[in-house]
Image (tube, helix red, strand yellow):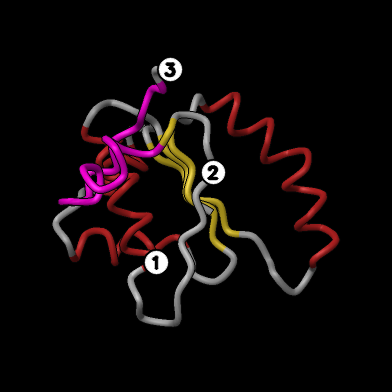
Amino acid sequence: MFMERIKTGIFGLDELIGGGIPKGHTVAVIGPFGAGKTTFGLQYLNHGLLNGERGIFISLEEESESIVRTAESFGWKFSEYVKNGMLTIIKLDPQDARATMTRIEGDISQEIREFGAKRLVF
């Protein structure tokens, strides 16, 4: 059975996992501080953005400016993507768990659909 796959844009990874992430699947990237989890997510988003796919980055820790700076340190033009409506960054407050969960279950799900995001990093 053929399963459509989404390329990550991460050198060597797509080949190791059969051509990319299976479309519609959720992938958890787990590791300690400094392991590259954020970089992995940003590179995945950047690959989609380069191919005309809209993306959303949801953060519980970093402010949007910090995320953009990190991406741009790799040469990825995230400030341009935000300005031209291809990328949105959502900052949630981990201190207010109830409001965050309510937002995830309602507002954010709707925002993802309305924005037309093809790639989501949380």
Up-down relation of residue 62 to residue 24 (above or below): below
Name the residue: 43% across, 82% down.
33
Position of 22 compared to 28: left or right? left
Q: CA distance from mark 1 to mark 2?
A: 15 Å
Helix, strand or loop at label 3? It is loop
Q: Nearer the viewer, residue 28 or 119?
A: 28
Density class for disc 2 (Cα within 10 Å; few <14, some 14-19, many ≥20) is few
Q: Is residue 68 magenta?
A: no
Density class for disc 3 (Cα within 10 Å; few <14, some 14-19, many ≥20) is few
Amino acid type for the residue under numbered disc 2: Thr
Indicate which disc, 2 or 3, sits on the residue closer to the N terminus. Answer: 3
Q: CA distance from mark 1 to mark 3?
A: 31 Å
Helix, strand or loop at label 2? It is loop
Residue 68 appears at what percent x and percent y?
33, 59
- Residue named by callout 3: 1
Point out the stretch of residues depicted in magenta: 3-21
Position of 91 compared to 103: left or right? left
Position of 67 compared to 10: left or right? right
Amino acid type for the residue under numbered disc 3: Met
Name the residue: 78% across, 38% down.
106
- Residue named by callout 1: 37
Q: Quadrant of the C terminus?
A: bottom right
Residue 28 appears at what percent x and percent y?
51, 56
Q: Give the residue at the far right of this rendering.
A: 98
Q: CA distance from mark 2 to mark 3?
A: 20 Å
Name the residue: 29% across, 37% down.
18
Residue 70 appears at what percent x and percent y?
29, 66
Magenta-colored segment: predominant secondary structure: loop
Instruction: In the rendered structure, find residue 66 and report the number of the disc placed on it.
Output: none
Instruction: In the rendered structure, find residue 26 and report the number of the disc placed on it.
Output: 2
